[in-house]
Image: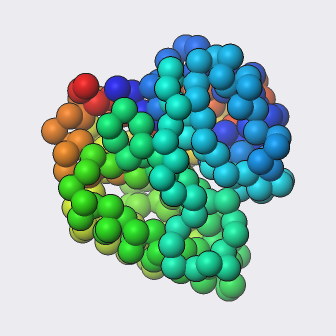
């Protein structure tokens, strides 16, 4: 089973890019972020025509998450993280697909420092609490999405321009490290322990042609899935396509 996470950066604006990638990569499950579409604008019909069932949480102009499944309908298990009933931002969705629990999460960016950074930390803390509960179930779970955290210095190109950015702050990295301490396995690092891997290249300052990237998109696996992991990678060519998202799809392959 091939599971991918992809920050599409506007699903209707880049629907052709998504369809091309689905046809080429043929993933079984796709976790999408940053839909930038409300509930009614989500292109469920077009995705169904391409062979994918879907569940989603939309939000006009911002955020938005979805889970697609090839040839089946995902079974929705949760919308939104527990812990703050007042938080209505469309940043978390969870579904059962082919015997596994899969999430699509779009963590807050957190810039500039201040209330937005505080929200980022609080939201990620809520993710930690829910992730610990999921891990304790012993079920096969994939925590997939755009975490908006660069876990380590090697996960960003050599630069000082991000020095004050929320993505690389010690508080952000510490929260990601705490996820791993719960027992989750970072699939990309499991397969590529020593390689430089990027998943995001900003549109500004010629960063894509210069390969000035960051690793923001992660798939974390619970114990039952680690032994089934056979491969993981990034479909970089999707970032180089015309009208591309600034993220590339990140994927894992699991034994059935």
Q: Position of residue 15 (x, y in %)?
A: 75, 28
Q: Residue at x 40, y 69 (%)?
A: 130
Tell me what residue is drawn at x 68 percent, y 17 percent.
Answer: 49
> Image check: 22 left or right of 203?
left
The residue lying toward the viewer, choosing from 196 and 180, is 180
Residue 119 percent across, percent down from the top left: 62, 79
Q: Nearer the viewer, residue 70 or 72?
A: 72
The answer to whether 190 appears left or right of 143 in the picture is left
Looking at the picture, how far across and down is residue 5, in whole percent?
Answer: 51, 40
Residue 203 seen in the figure: no
**From this viewpoint, which residue is outermost toward the top?**
24
Task: Examine the rendering and report whether any part of residue 68 can be seen.
Answer: yes
Residue drawn at 19 percent across, 45 percent down: 224
Instruction: Locate residue 27, reporting x and y percent.
Output: 47, 24
Scheme by which the image is coloured: rainbow
Occupied quadrant, residue 11: top right
Q: Quadrant of the N terminus?
A: top left
166 relative to 88 in the view: left or right:
left
Q: In the picture, which quadrant includes the C terminus? A: top left
**Vertical side of 116 occupied by 96: above or below:** above
Q: Residue furthest left?
A: 227
Nearer-the-camera pick, 160 or 204: 204
Q: Is residue 177 shown above or below 221?
A: below
Image quarter of residue 99: top left
Q: Is residue 153 left or right of residue 238?
A: left
- Total marks drawn? 0
Residue beneath the point at 57% across and 63% down: 80
């Amino acid at each position: 089973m091939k599971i991918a996470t992809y920050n599409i950066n506007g699903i209707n604006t880049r629907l052709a890019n998504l369809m091309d990638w689905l046809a080429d990569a043929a993933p079984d499950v796709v976790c999408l972020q940053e839909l930038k579409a409300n509930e009614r604008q989500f292109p469920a019909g077009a995705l169904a025509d391409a062979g994918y069932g879907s569940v989603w949480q939309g939000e006009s102009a911002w955020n938005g998450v979805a889970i697609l499944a090839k040839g089946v309908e995902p079974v929705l298990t949760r919308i939104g993280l527990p812990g703050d009933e007042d938080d209505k931002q469309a940043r978390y969705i969870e579904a059962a697909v082919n015997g596994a629990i899969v999430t699509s999460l779009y963590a807050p960016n957190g810039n500039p420092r201040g209330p937005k950074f505080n929200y980022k930390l609080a939201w990620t803390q809520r993710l930690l609490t829910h992730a610990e509960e999921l891990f304790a179930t012993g079920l096969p779970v994939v925590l997939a999405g755009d975490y908006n955290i660069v876990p380590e210095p090697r996960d960003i190109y050599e630069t000082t321009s991000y020095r004050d950015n929320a993505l690389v702050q010690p508080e952000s990295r510490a929260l990601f490290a705490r996820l791993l301490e719960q027992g989750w396995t970072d699939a990309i690092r499991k397969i590529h322990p020593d390689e430089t891997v990027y998943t995001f290249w900003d549109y500004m300052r010629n960063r894509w042609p210069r390969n000035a990237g960051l690793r923001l998109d992660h798939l974390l696996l619970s114990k039952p899935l680690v032994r089934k992991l056979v491969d993981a990678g990034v479909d970089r060519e999707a970032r180089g396509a015309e009208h591309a998202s600034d993220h590339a799809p990140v994927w894992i392959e699991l034994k059935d």
